[in-house]
Amino acid sequence: MSQTLTDRDAIRQWAIARGGNPVLMEVPDGSRSRTVLQLSFGQDSLNADGNEGPDRIGGFELVSWEDWFAALEANKLALMVSDDPAGGNEAEFSFVERA
């Protein structure tokens, strides 16, 4: 079973409970650019006090939750997650169009 999350607090709590961080990447799309959303898991070193490099993972940049939610809403997306308690803390999710 799965559930679709659109509430900011519910999405943030789901991601943080699994060690997730909000990341974005701007990619060319014709004459414009588009924003690609993702959640990055297990990237605790990005948030470490001693991190002196840029907060980037494979082209994605670590951003604030506010910036991430703005992009999520601008793209009219929601987060679909498993609500199966047997799934443990696995970070299984997908982005879906908002209803």
Image (cartoon, rainbow, N blue to C red):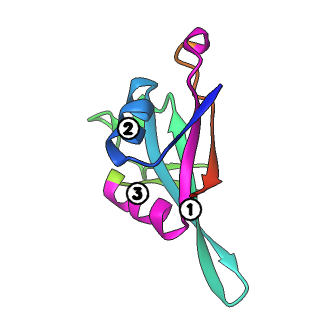
Quick one: 70 or 61, which is closer to the camera?
70
Q: Residue flagged by tag 1: what amino acid is it?
A: Met
- Image coordinates for residue 6, horizontal then vertical, percent: 45, 49
Secondary structure at badge 1 equals strand
**80 sits left or right of 17 in the view:** right
CA separation in Å, label 3 and label 2: 12 Å
CA separation in Å, label 3 and label 1: 14 Å
Secondary structure at badge 3 equals helix
Q: Which residues are magenta?
A: 66-87
CA separation in Å, label 2 and label 1: 23 Å
Report which residue position mark 1 lands on: 25
Residue 68: image quadrant is bottom left
Report which residue position mark 3 lands on: 69
Q: Quadrant of the C terminus?
A: bottom right
Vertical relation: 51 (above or below) 74: above
Tag nearer the camera, 3 or 1: 3
Report which residue position mark 2 lands on: 10
Sequence-earlier tag: 3 or 1: 1
Quick one: 24 or 48, which is closer to the camera?
24
Residue 52: image quadrant is top left
Sequence-earlier tag: 2 or 1: 2
Q: Residue flagged by tag 2: what amino acid is it?
A: Ala
Q: Residue flagged by tag 3: what amino acid is it?
A: Phe
At 63% from the left and 86% from the top, the residue drawn is 32
Quick one: 55 or 41, which is closer to the camera?
41
Vertical relation: 62 (above or below) 73: above
Mark 2 burial class by Cα count in 10 Å: few <14, some 14-19, many 20+: few
At 32% from the left and 41% from the top, the residue drawn is 9
- Image coordinates for residue 20, horizontal then vertical, percent: 45, 34
